[in-house]
Amino acid sequence: MSTVGRLMKTLATAGKPAVRLALAEGAQALVLPHGGRVLGLYAADCAENFLWTNPALRTAKGTVALFASEEWCNTGGDRTWIAPENDFFRPDYPKNAQYFQPRQLDPGAYRCELKDGGARLSCDLVLRSYRMREDVRLRIVKRIEPTASPFHQIKDAPWVRALSFAGYTLRATLELRGKAKRSVAGMWSLLQMPHSGRMLVPVRSRTKPSLYFGTIPDGDLELGEHAIRYTMRGAGSHKIGVKALALTGRAGYLYRTGRVWALVVRNFAVNPSGTYADFLTDGTCPGDAFQACSVSDAVFGRFSELEYHVPAIGGATGLTCCTDASQVWAFRGSLTAIRRAAAALLGSGDVESVCEY
């Protein structure tokens, strides 16, 4: 049985069935309705998941225990949350002692349908804005579908042929289903990958990111003229954010398994005129459209998150609906081929050292 098949069987045994989605170039994705996420992404010639999944999912016993726990069930993969985090995840805001993932959002009650070569996930929910003290009725609709490699027009180049590829497009809609006089809500995508890699964030000029929490070790955060490089290997939890105005609309994550390198890139829309709603717990620094979070602890595990936000709806925005489309492109191959891919997609002028950490 394949790696994907074993994971599907384990999830089904725990009462959380997943669906397999065929992608371009023989790749495949594993879509988990519980939590409304892409749990796995696999190239045609490799059984290894590009994304991080909770180690508990390796066994039937661990999977059953994970879903039975009263703690938030972090299965891994690519999920969608709603920002601002302080409004919906901190019940006693402006105090920050409590943090609770609203279960109506994650895992939610997603409906899943396979149609026209893609997977459609939809969820109706009500979130409480603790800061604004009002309920917000929302509908989330997500469609996962195949996408071509960004290198499909130069597929005969030797370094492109040396890469394994898997990718998908995520089309998402957030709709306000009732009145929200004061509250805003914005889609927030979080892509989890194995820990101890390097996040590469192209920027238009030298930019100092916001620090949400944690203390990043000396040397792990490098600020270049046109790139932020964040080596995500420290213990504990650390998070940074970057304003929409500075972003180019792509970010990538490099990691390796033995001698084989992987590069996962997210291609997303940026609108500096939009209302990016997330902010620090002290009420400062709204406007971050990109975030990177490093987690290495005994509670949630060890993973790195590539996160991006969509401009919010509701409140003073006057908007009741928004749509978004992003691509996830994942590659695996030699250091030489991955360097070429990183330089082409992320615009790194420092190709020789981009993978050295």
Image (spheres, rainbow, N blue to C red):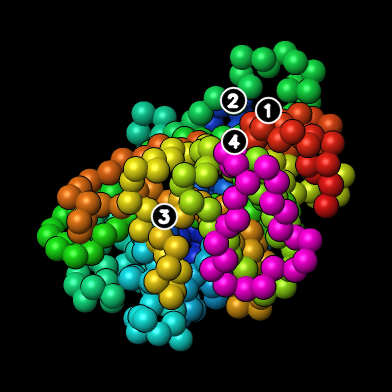
Q: How many marks?
A: 4
Q: Can residue 130 be spotted in the picture? A: yes
Q: Position of residue 208 (x, y in %)?
A: 60, 55
Mark 2 is surrounded, within 10 Å at the Cα level, by few (under 14), some (14 to 19) or many (20 or more) other residues, namely: some
The earlier-in-sequence mark between 3 and 2 is 2
Determine whether 265 is above or below 316 in the image.
Answer: above
Which of label 2 and label 1 is nearer to you? 1
Q: Amino acid at mark 2?
A: Pro
Q: Find the distance from the CA under tag 3 to the CA under tag 2.
A: 29 Å
Which residue is label 4 attached to? Answer: 329
Disc 3 to disc 4: CB gap under 8 Å: no
What segment is highlighted magenta in the picture? 202-225
**Mark 3, secondary structure of its residue:** loop
**Mark 1, secondary structure of its residue:** helix
Mark 3 is surrounded, within 10 Å at the Cα level, by few (under 14), some (14 to 19) or many (20 or more) other residues, namely: many
Which residue is label 2 attached to? Answer: 150
Residue 209 highlighted magenta (yes or no): yes
